[in-house]
Each structure stands twice: as structure tokens, then as C-alpha cells.
Image: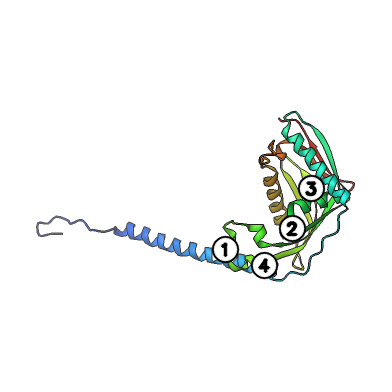
Amino acid sequence: MDAGGSVQKRGGFGCLGYGCLVSVCLLSVVLALVGLYLVRSVRNAVDTYTSPQPPSFQISPVPQAAVAAAEADLREIEALLKDPSGAGAVQLSSDEVSAAARAIFGDVADVSIEGSAFRGRFSMPLEKIFGESAARYVIGERISRSVYGSARGTVELRDRAVVINLSELELSGRRQEAQALVAASEWFSEAVTSALSEKPKPPAGGDALIDRLSELALRDGMLMVSILPRR
């Protein structure tokens, strides 16, 4: 109160303003700690499930006839996707699937079909997995490490999405339990669906495979791929 009896206004934020400032500061500290924890958790997981020097990886030989057949099958699928009215079914044997996987991933993965399930072995550098994504900056120098192991599971098409259910997964010699199998199945399902949702790049062109699929299944040691006309 001044000499004239009037109340002077208090400058600054006031109680509410200072309370908000403190809350923001505390929230920033909490977020920073959570971020550091997540970074440390990711790096610990990388240390646990990868290796700077993975064991030597030998892929199974694929007959040249299977390589030629796989190339013909992929060309047939490509032609169907270019034609809006194209429809057909393609069946790939286990050897043909192995040849196709090798064409996509190189000599870092070996895939085969056993009845209605697939089995895969892999030894893949993190550099190849993450590419230029932001994850490589979280991992840091660990990007030079590799993840290796094996997996077994099934594949099906459900509501225009690929669903992969893993029944076995081993990473760097560690057999994964049920919770990890569920998480890995979801990750692989989303990754494969996303990949098949991309339209072929020029000069191939055509529709995205996921938009034309009516069947994607493993049966009797074969991969069944059925394509419908554009919807």
C-alpha cells in the first residue's frame, strides 16, 4: 500500500506464474531423465542381443534352376501388378523363396519353408537394418555391430495386412520367451505390410502388392501368392 492508501500491483509472475514455471522445469527434468533412461535401455539391449564379431554365417546353396524360376515368378507378379485387370496365382517352392530372399537381402539371410511354416537364419549388420534413420544416432558407435540368430513362424493375410506369428526366435544365442515373440511378431508384421504397401518404383511401376493380394500363405512347403484385379 502506498502513502495515499492505494494498493500497488505486484510485479512479476505472481504465485500462479512461478508455480507454472517450476512445473515446467520439473517436467523438463523428468523428460530428460526418461530420455536418458530410454537411450541407455536401447544401448543395453543392443549390447545384449548383438555382437561386434558374429559367428561366421554360411547360407545354403540354391540350385540355379530355382534362381531362374524365382526370377520368372517375380516377373509374373510384376506384370500382374502393372495390369489393372490382371489376376493370377503364383506358387514358389522353398528353394525359390530362398533365391528371392537372397535377391532382396543379399547373403545375410537364409529362408526356407517347412510345411506351413517358414524358418529363417540371419546375420545382419545394424547398419543395414537402420540405414540413415534416427535410431543410428541413439545407438552411436554400436551401429557397427551385427544381430544374428534364427526364427520360425507362419504367415497369413488378414484385412489387407500381413500377419506373421513367430513360434521360435533366437537372438545372439538367447532363446526369446513368449512376450518377446509377441512383440517381434508385431514388428515383423508391420514391417512386411509397410514394405508391400509401397508401389514399385519406375521403370517397373504398377500397384502396391498389398492392394491386390487375395492370398499370401504357406502350404505344403510352398508360398502361395494370389492376385486379384484392381479394386
Tell which circle, 3 or 2, labels the residue nearer the N-terminal end.
3
Is there a contact, CB below 8 Å, between mark 3 and mark 2? no
Q: Which residue is mark 4?
A: 145
Q: In this view, which residue lies farthest toward the top?
A: 85
Label 3: which secondary element: strand
Q: Is residue 212 above or below residue 53?
A: above
Q: Which residue is mark 1?
A: 138
Q: Which residue is mark 3?
A: 155
For the C terminus, the quadrant is top right
Identify the residue at horizontal 85%, vertical 45% (top origin).
Answer: 69
Q: From the viewer's perspective, is the residue at label 2 or at label 4 nearer?
A: 4
| Mark pair 2, 4: CA separation | 22 Å
Q: Amino acid at mark 2?
A: Leu
Q: Amino acid at mark 3?
A: Val
For the N terminus, the quadrant is bottom left
Q: Which residue is mark 2?
A: 181
Quadrant of residue 17 within the rendered picture: bottom left
